[in-house]
Amino acid sequence: MDKLIEVLLDYQQRSGQDDKEFGQRLGMGRALWNAVRHGRRRLTVKHLGRVLQHYPNLEYEVLLYLKTHAGGES
């Protein structure tokens, strides 16, 4: 699992938000966030922007995610 996803899951757990609430925070629905959590889908650039809006301290993890997944979005 990507470090960024691990950190986001930790933030979700600590905030007490369910998948719907946390997904909305990141600009996606419950089903998409669930697919991202389980590695079936990747975060898009739009969603990474939302991550940085809410969690600017995750800049390094976002850059690493982009580097790891360069070449396409699913």
Image (spheres, rainbow, N blue to C red):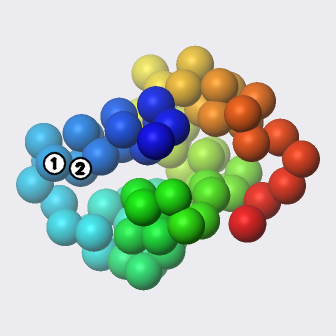
Q: Nearer the viewer, residue 62 or 2?
A: 2
Q: What x and y, as percent, mark residue 18?
A: 19, 67
Q: Residues within 10 Å of mark 1 (few under 14, many from 20)?
A: few
Residue in view at x 37 percent, y 77 percent:
30
What kind of element bears circle 2? Answer: helix
Q: What x and y, as percent, mark residue 8?
A: 36, 42
User: Residue 39: which numbered mark, if any?
Assistant: none
Image-based side of 23 in relation to 14, left or right: right
What kind of element bears circle 1? Answer: helix
**Residue 54 makes an appearance in the image:** no
Residue in view at x 83 percent, y 40 percent:
70
Q: From the viewer's perspective, is residue 32 above or below residue 37?
A: below
Q: What x and y, as percent, mark residue 5?
A: 43, 43
Q: What x and y, as percent, mark residue 13?
A: 16, 48
Q: Nearer the viewer, residue 1 or 74?
A: 1
Q: Nearer the viewer, residue 21 or 62?
A: 62
Three-letter code, disc 2? Gln
Q: Residues within 10 Å of mark 2 (few under 14, many from 20)?
A: some
Image-based side of 58 in relation to 30, left or right: right
Three-letter code, disc 1? Gln
Q: From the viewer's perspective, is residue 60 above or below residue 4?
A: above
Q: Quadrant of the C terminus?
A: bottom right
Check if mark 2's residue and mark 1's residue have beta carbons within 8 Å.
Answer: yes
Image-based side of 66 in relation to 48, left or right: right
Q: CA distance from mark 2 to mark 1?
A: 4 Å
In this figure, which residue is indicated by the disc labeled 2?
Answer: 12
Residue in view at x 31 percent, y 61 percent:
22
In this figure, which residue is indicated by the disc labeled 1?
Answer: 13
Q: Quadrant of residue 68?
A: top right
**Residue 47 makes an appearance in the image:** yes
